[in-house]
Amino acid sequence: PDMPVRWAMYHPQSARQVMLATELGVWTTNDAGADEVIWTQDAGMPNVRVDMLQMRESDNTVLAATHGRGLMYCTWDYNPPVFIPEKRPLEISIYPNPASNYLRFNNTEEKNLKLELLTLDGRLVLEKILLEEEEADISHLSEGTYVARLISEHGSRSEKLIIQR
């Protein structure tokens, strides 16, 4: 935070987790190594100058020495940052489009790739797990416009598919 910092300490289980004693209480972050660090003020402490922090590592109890308000304490839990990987669009092509009897895919990387074909009103008409170099038989489907959706553990892709004979 943009204010005078009087004391800083790292959590004993993670150097990314930091606690600060400031002019306006105690502030913490769970990811000091992030590009944009998010600081959170301790909700249980008043906006008072804190001059020093000490930790009892046996139970992670932190003692904060304030200026004029005495001593305050809390337990500082280990909270590692949670990283949620972004799903990316799949780089897999569905061809031919328009199609007649079979769909093919240029899948070289994805395992357990699932194909779903939906009507434009959202009704599922085909669901299939695709193995490498596999085709999907669509000869039983009526001519028309569909939504083809490919789904893997790394992402998904949807595109309009036209079936004509």
Image (cartoon, grey):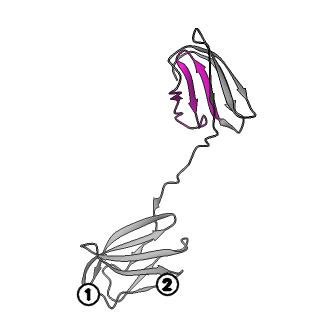
Q: Quadrant of residue 141?
A: bottom left
x, y (%) of residue 16? 64, 36
Magenta region includes residue 28: yes
Horizontal arrangement in the rendering, residue 128 relative to residue 28 (left or right): left
In the image, 131 versus 46, the foreground residue is 46
Q: Is residue 121 above or below residue 80?
A: below
Q: CA distance from mark 2 to mark 1?
A: 22 Å
Element carrying mark 2: loop
Q: Which mark is residue 156?
A: none
Mark 1 belongs to which amino acid? Ser
Mark 1 sits on what residue? Answer: 142
Mark 2 belongs to which amino acid? Glu
List the single residue furthest toward the top: 68
* Residue neighbourhood size for the residue with mark 2, other residues' Cα within 10 Å, grouped as few (<14), some (14–19), many (≥20): few
Please state, as top left, top right, bottom left or bottom right, where the C terminus lies in the image: bottom left
Mark 2 sits on what residue? Answer: 134
x, y (%) of residue 122? 28, 72
The magenta segment is 17-43
Q: Is residue 85 above or below residue 81?
A: below
In the image, 55 versus 37, the foreground residue is 55
